Amino acid sequence: HNNEVLDLISDVNEVLKSKTSIVKKLQTENENEALIEYINPPISIVIAGAGNDVQPLVKMASILGWKITVRDGRATHTIEKRFPKADKVNAVKSEEFLENITIDNQTYFVLMTHNYKYDLAVLKSLLKTDCQYIGILGPKTKLNRMLDDLQNEGITVSEEQLERIYSPVGLDIGAETSEEIALSIVSEIKAF
């Protein structure tokens, strides 16, 4: 029996590595089979911003079964009833934005507070992590200004870090309304 358990454990490790499910015949009298199924963890979207334009993004992400965190500096906006589909809604200072957030390869960040300094501070924190996707709402000029301001603080953003920044956020689908922008953001993350 011990060998069987060890075999199964090594099969489970294999499934975790390959991210594909397998069916295994067990060496028992009854020729049992075991399905070892790989279930991808849900995508986790962390949104800096709690304005009205975040509401359709939260709705769309929730339809897809994503885990949603909404954070903003404004206690007046970070109210759970404004974002009933979000898993967590917190008012936090920009320098505490990443507290209690686990970042893995399924974690995506979108900066859309409409508060330049807040977004910049969050971007600065995110660049120190290995998160793969940082979407920034707003025109390319906003990102260039952010990069200049970081440079003035003595922070040079590497090519590798720049590749993780998506600005303007979202696929170019000609989006204009909040709902269309939300669709373009969700689509870009899904494509990524």
Image (spheres, rainbow, N blue to C red):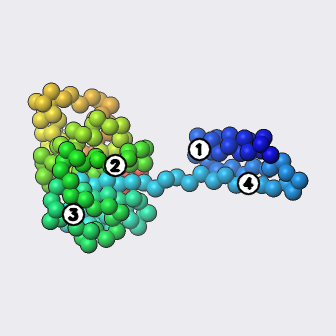
Q: Do the residues labelled 1 and 3 touch (CB within 8 Å)?
A: no
Between the residue at mark 1 and the residue at mark 3, the CA separation in whole angstroms equals 37 Å
Between the residue at mark 2 and the residue at mark 4, the CA separation in whole angstroms equals 35 Å
Tell me the element at label 4.
strand
Q: Is residue 37 left or right of residue 98?
A: right
Q: Are marks 1 and 4 in contact (CB under 8 Å)?
A: no
The residue labelled by disc 1 is: 16
Q: Which residue is drawn at 27% across and 59% down?
A: 70
Tell me the element at label 3.
loop
The residue labelled by disc 4 is: 34
Indicate which disc, 2 or 1, sits on the residue closer to the N terminus.
Answer: 1
Number of other residues with Cα within 10 Å of mark 3, as a class: few under 14, some 14 to 19, many 20 or more: many
Between the residue at mark 2 and the residue at mark 3, the CA separation in whole angstroms equals 17 Å
Tally of marks:
4
Q: Which x, y percent locates residue 41?
A: 49, 53
Q: Which x, y percent locates residue 125?
A: 24, 40
Indicate which disc, 2 or 3, sits on the residue closer to the N terminus.
Answer: 3
Residue 78 — which label? 3
